[in-house]
Each structure stands twice: as C-alpha cells, then as structure tokens.
C-alpha cells in the first residue's frame, strides 16, 4: 500500500514538473522579418514550443511590473520623425533605422499628408506592457527548412565552379526572401492603441507645445473612454477638434473593439490575446554559428556568411532612396525614404515659374498667374519658345454703295504673338508645379494619358490662333502651396525646333530626362518639354533580394556510380531544374556514402593476382558472407528474446507452490502466511 502511495505521489510531481507554461506570442520568437515592410517570414529557429504557446527552455519570460497604459504624444512635422506603433530595434544593423518600415501602411498614411506642407500629424500612442520574451541565441536550433537551404548554398560554394557560384547567389537571395534578413530574438507583448490626427497648420499658432500635448492626450482618452489625469479645458478640446482634418485609429492586441466598448473592457482581454508592441531583431548572418554547421569546412562556412552579408547589403542599397524629406522645403522629394539635407537646397521641380504670351491682339494675350502680368517671378528668366509668330489673313469686302453700284476694297489683318516660359536654373525660388501639357484633341497629356490635367491642377490655356479658339496649348499648373507636389514633375526645360533648351543650350533634354513632344503646333515648328524619367513611376516600391537578376545558368553536375564520374546536367526550365537539383543533391550524398564504403572495403581487401574466375569466386564468397551476416543479425536477437522468456517462465514455476488444501498456487511472497 505504501508503495502504491509513493508511486502515485511521484507521478503527480513528475507531471507538475513537466507541465509547460502557456505564454502567448511564443511562436513568434525565431520568425524571420523584413525590416523594410515589417512583413513576417518563415521560421528561422525551431523553438520546439510544445504546441502553439508553450514556453520552451531556450526562451526566458520577464513579467512587467504593472499593466498600466503609458501614453506618448509625438508631433510629426517632418517625414524623418515618423515612427511605427511597434518599436523595432535592429541590433548590429543601425543603417536600417532610417528606412525601416518606410514601406508600411501607417507610414504611407502619414506620408500622404506630409506631402502637403500645411499639414502636421499628431501621433498619440498608448502602450500596455504585460511581459517580455527573450531568446537565448546560443541555445537556439535552426529549422529544418532553413538548415536544408543553407546546406545547399554551402554545397554550391564548395563545388567552386562558375555555374555553382551563380547558383549560390541565387539560393542566397531565395533564402533572404523566404526567411527575411533578420530573425526575431526578443518581444514585448501587450496591447497598443494609436490615434493619428491630421492637423491644419493654420491652427498651429493657437497652441504651445504643452497645451497641444494635453489636448491631444485628452482627445485620445475621450475617444477610448480612458479615465485618468488627461484633462484639458473645453476651449482647448474645441480648438483641437476644429483643427483636425482627418483621423486614423490603430488597435493591436486584445479582443476586437466593440462600437460602444471601453478601455477597461479591452484591457481584460489582453492576457488572452496579446500582441507584439516592441521587438528586437538580429541579422541572420549574426546568429548563424559555426557550431551548428560543424560538418562544413570553415573556409566554406566563412564564404557562406560573407555571401549572406553581401546580398543583404545589396538589398539595403536597392531600397534606399535619398532625398529631401522636409515638406516645408521647395526641394521635397515624395519618393525619398532617407533624408539628405543637402538636397533640400536644390529643387528641380521649382524650375518652372509659369508662362505668358504677349500679342497685339487682345484675344491672344496671356498673363502669368504668379505675377498677373507679362513677366516672370523674381529669380526666373523668360525664355521664348519661338520667334515672334505673325498671324494674318486677307479680307475682300464688298457692299452696296449708292443705288446701283457695289463698292469693294481689299485689306490685310495681321497680329504677332510670342509665348514665353519662366525657368529657374538652380531651383532656389518658389514657383509652380508643372503637371504636363496637351494640345487640343491632338496631343494627350503624358501625365494623365488624356486631354486633361491632373487633379488639383488648373488649365492655363495659351491660344495660338486668333480666329480659331480650338487651336491652343493647355498647360497644367498648380501653386507651390497647393499640396500637389506628388503629381508635379521634374522640369528639365522647354525647347522648340528653332529655340534650344536653356538648360543644355542644345536641342536635347538633360541627362535623366525624357522629351515629350506637343507636335508641330507653331506653324510647322515642333515644341518639346522635358520631364524626369522617374516621374512616371509613382510611389517607391520595395525591391526584394535578387529582383531583376537573371536566373543562374541552369547547369549542374551529378555523380554516376556506374561510370564513376561527374556528368553535366543542362536543364531548360526552372521547375525541372529544381527537381534535378534535388536529385543531384541526393546522388551526391549517395556518392559520399558509397565512397566511404568502398574505401573501407579496399582497405580490408587482400592483394591478389588471380584470374577473373578467382575474382568471381571471391565476389561470390563476399556475397555469401554478407548474406550470412544479415541472417545472423536477425536471428541472434530473436534467439536471445526466446531464451529470456523461457528462463522467466521456468523461474516463475520454481518459485510458486501448490497448496492442495486451498486448491490454488501460492506465490513466493504468500507462502510464509
């Protein structure tokens, strides 16, 4: 009885000791990550988390001292000030910080309003921290998928051929696309409420920094029904509300926020549904340790690490776009994600300062919208697009004169006109945004691909024929403070077939610009304007590793055991190549095993000079010997098991006694009763 009780207590203790703590978010440790888009990738580490949320031994949990919300207000008046609601800490790769998350959704939302210089964004973030998870890097093991792909890369490096070198680069880019450039090593879990308020800067002067912060926090607390010391006067709240032009709300963690929900209700659901609010990432090349690939030559392993680092650096370079990110600067670059202050002093979008046309015919006269006169703004120079054009026609008029006579007379009507554009060569002045041009029902606008101007631009019409109102050029322009900088194009000058481009002094566009023709609009003379090549590409797009590179030469080698030589494989399509590569890799492993076995047999084989008949006899003996070895390996264990069972039965019979009085067999421990 005591033995059973002891065994039962031992079983309870064992189950208690082996029960794994369930912790939300554990499965995200070891995930790969792309710092540009913050997209999650495949599992780099196999953390063996005992299901979905078990806490493995290689991960340590730190509970936070309290679960109160910490609130932060940030005034974003410059694109370089934008931070994500998740704070990504990229260890050993500080160069990522300036571009990390610049392809994310929240960045894009703020970016849209930052392109309008009179808008600011108030970002109010409330974080509730529950606990932290930290991986023990030295104890982590790579996932099977990661390990297999890394093996293939190092195998290609080890072969040291031109084809295998191209293949190793291709596979490394594939690894970075599948698993990301970084791995998640630490997480802070809890919940986040974030509110983005777009503020009209015309209301900005009504606040000092402290009052604005108080009003923003009070507005945030009111929206999420949070009680606390975030109070502001009704006047401040009303002014803050009046200045808002748009609001965006992000909630992560907890249950979905109901329409009439409160902060306290949401807070209760956080432990069951925690979200990541802070994260720490290390580059994959940093966490790959040689001890996990000890079967690989050290030189090959070092080349593998260098290849991963080089392809990662190239991916950074491809997605780094330098430019002026200050929307208050005339040099603001919508496509930039890394700020370069030097570029804020020069702006080729501001080379255009409007246009005007002078004529002795009032119907052909056109004033510059910026000056309301036939002049250019200060700092701009007027460049004629053509020589003075003379418009004329002959009139023959007859009318009745006296009673029976007709009086006729001939006369000529003529006018001159000349069209000018205002250009600035250094871009240091504030002018207009240029949104392309089109010719009536003949030449489309390159920007809109139609006979229209982009949204937000007005039509500045230059009439070319005093007697035909349908003949003219529509110039699309917008004031500098209109917020249309994202659709404005970089102007590289204007020229016609007899007036050179003032920026090149030739009949060509500058380098990096392409020509757009408006046809033979000036009585047989062609007019051309130059726009930046990148203007038609829109917002920057993330470029994945290896994008645009050619698929490596589909040549590989595999070992044929029967011929004892490497044969070249030529495959014409990628799918067949992948299949053949897998087969080649397996054959290579077979070759290694066969080589080791043959080497062992050669070492044990005696030296002989007998004829082929004796060789065949020797092979037969070897075959019989191997067959006997297999039979012995099977029957010997069976014989041992049978002998053990027989001895056990005999032993039981020897120890048991038959009691004729009781009519049953007494066991050995009952015979003493």
Image (spheres, rainbow, N blue to C red):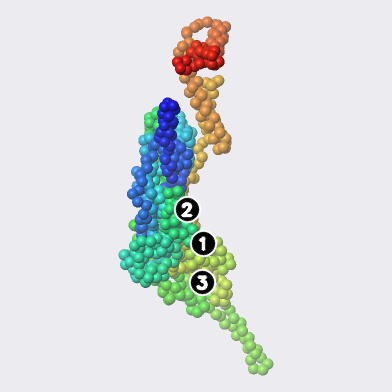
Front: mark 2 or 1: 2
- Quarter of the image with the N terminus in it: top left
Q: Secondary structure at mark 2?
A: loop
Residue at 50%, 79% (x, y): give it: 362
As drawn, the label of residue 76 is none
Q: Which residue is mark 3?
A: 461
Mark closer to the chain start, 2 or 3:
2
Residue 224 appears in the figure: yes
Residue at 48%, 45% (x, y): give it: 547
Q: Which residue is mark 2?
A: 255
Front: mark 3 or 1: 1
Mark closer to the chain start, 3 or 1:
1
Residue at the far front: name it: 661
Q: Are marks 2 and 3 in contact (CB under 8 Å)?
A: no
State the image coordinates of residue 259 (x, y, percent, origin top left).
49, 60
Q: Are marks 2 and 1 in contact (CB under 8 Å)?
A: no
Q: Foreground residue, 107 or 19?
A: 19
Residue at 47%, 41% (x, y): give it: 52
As drawn, the label of residue 447 is 1
* Circle 1 residues within 10 Å: few <14, some 14–19, many ≥20: many
* CA–CA distance in space, label 2 to label 3: 57 Å
- Residue 486 sits in quarter: bottom left
Q: Foreground residue, 227 or 232?
A: 227
Residue 217 relative to residue 517: left or right? left
Q: Is residue 265 above or below residue 316?
A: below
* Circle 2 residues within 10 Å: few <14, some 14–19, many ≥20: some
Q: Foreground residue, 609 or 440?
A: 609
Mark closer to the chain start, 2 or 1:
2
State the image coordinates of residue 625 (x, y, percent, origin top left).
53, 10
* CA–CA distance in space, label 2 to label 1: 46 Å
Residue at the far bottom: name it: 403
């Amino acid at each position: 009885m005591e033995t059973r009780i002891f065994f039962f207590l031992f079983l309870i203790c064992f189950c208690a000791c082996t029960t794994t703590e369930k912790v939300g978010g554990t499965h995200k440790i070891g995930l790969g990550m792309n710092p540009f888009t913050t997209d999650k990738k495949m599992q780099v580490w196999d953390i063996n988390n005992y299901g979905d949320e078990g806490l493995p031994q290689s991960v340590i949990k730190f509970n936070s001292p309290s679960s109160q919300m910490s609130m932060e207000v940030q005034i974003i008046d410059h694109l370089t000030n934008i931070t994500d609601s998740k704070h990504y800490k990229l260890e050993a790769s500080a160069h990522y910080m300036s571009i990390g998350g610049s392809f994310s959704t929240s960045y894009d939302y703020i970016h849209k309003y930052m392109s309008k210089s009179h808008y600011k964004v108030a970002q109010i973030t409330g974080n509730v921290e529950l606990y932290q998870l930290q991986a023990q890097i030295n104890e982590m093991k790579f996932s099977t998928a990661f390990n297999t792909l890394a093996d293939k890369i190092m195998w290609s490096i080890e072969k040291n051929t031109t084809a295998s070198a191209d293949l190793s680069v291709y596979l490394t880019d594939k690894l970075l696309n599948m698993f990301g450039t970084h791995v998640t090593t630490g997480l802070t879990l809890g919940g986040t409420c974030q509110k983005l308020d777009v503020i009209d800067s015309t209301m900005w002067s009504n606040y000092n920094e402290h009052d604005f912060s108080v009003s923003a926090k009070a507005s945030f607390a009111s929206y999420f029904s949070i009680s606390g010391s975030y109070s502001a006067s009704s006047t401040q709240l009303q002014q803050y509300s009046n200045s808002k032009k748009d609001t965006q709300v992000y909630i992560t963690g907890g249950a979905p926020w109901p329409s009439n929900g409160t902060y306290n209700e949401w807070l209760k659901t956080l432990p069951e549904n925690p979200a990541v609010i802070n994260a720490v990432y290390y580059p994959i090349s940093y966490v790959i340790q040689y001890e996990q690939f000890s079967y690989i030559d050290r030189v090959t392993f070092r080349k593998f690490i260098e290849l991963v680092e080089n392809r990662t650096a190239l991916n950074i370079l491809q997605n780094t776009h330098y430019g002026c990110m200050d929307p208050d600067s005339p040099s603001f670059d919508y496509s930039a994600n890394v700020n370069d202050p030097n570029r804020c002093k020069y702006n080729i979008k501001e080379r255009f300062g409007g246009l005007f046309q002078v004529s002795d015919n009032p119907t052909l006269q056109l004033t510059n919208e910026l000056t309301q006169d036939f002049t250019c703004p200060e700092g701009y120079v007027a460049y004629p697009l053509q020589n003075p054009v003379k418009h004329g026609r002959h009139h023959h008029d007859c009318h009745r004169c006296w009673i029976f006579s007709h009086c006729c007379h001939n006369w000529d009507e003529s006018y001159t006109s000349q069209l000018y554009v205002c250009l600035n060569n250094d871009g240091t002045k504030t002018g207009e945004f240029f949104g392309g041009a089109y010719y009536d029902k003949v030449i489309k606008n390159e920007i809109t691909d139609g006979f229209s101007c982009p949204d937000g631009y007005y039509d500045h019409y230059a009439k070319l024929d005093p007697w035909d109102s349908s003949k003219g050029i529509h110039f699309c322009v917008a004031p500098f403070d209109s917020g249309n900088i994202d659709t404005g194009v970089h102007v590289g000058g204007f020229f016609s077939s007899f007036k050179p481009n003032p920026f090149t002094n030739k009949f060509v566009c500058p380098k990096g610009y392409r020509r757009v023709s408006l046809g033979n609009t000036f009585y047989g003379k062609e007019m051309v304007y130059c726009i930046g090549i990148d203007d038609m590409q829109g917002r920057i797009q993330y470029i994945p590793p290896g994008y645009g590179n050619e698929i490596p030469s589909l040549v590989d080698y595999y070992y044929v055991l029967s011929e004892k030589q490497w044969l070249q494989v030529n495959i014409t399509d990628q799918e067949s190549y992948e299949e053949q590569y897998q087969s080649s890799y397996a054959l290579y492993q077979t070759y290694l095993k066969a080589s080791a076995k043959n080497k062992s047999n050669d070492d044990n084989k005696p030296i002989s000079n007998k004829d082929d008949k004796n060789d065949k006899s020797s092979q037969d003996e070897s075959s019989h010997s191997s067959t006997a070895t297999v039979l012995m390996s099977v029957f010997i264990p069976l014989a041992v098991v049978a002998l053990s069972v027989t001895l056990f039965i005999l032993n039981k019979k020897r120890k048991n006694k038959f009691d004729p009085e009781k009519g049953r067999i007494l066991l050995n421990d009952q015979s003493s009763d």
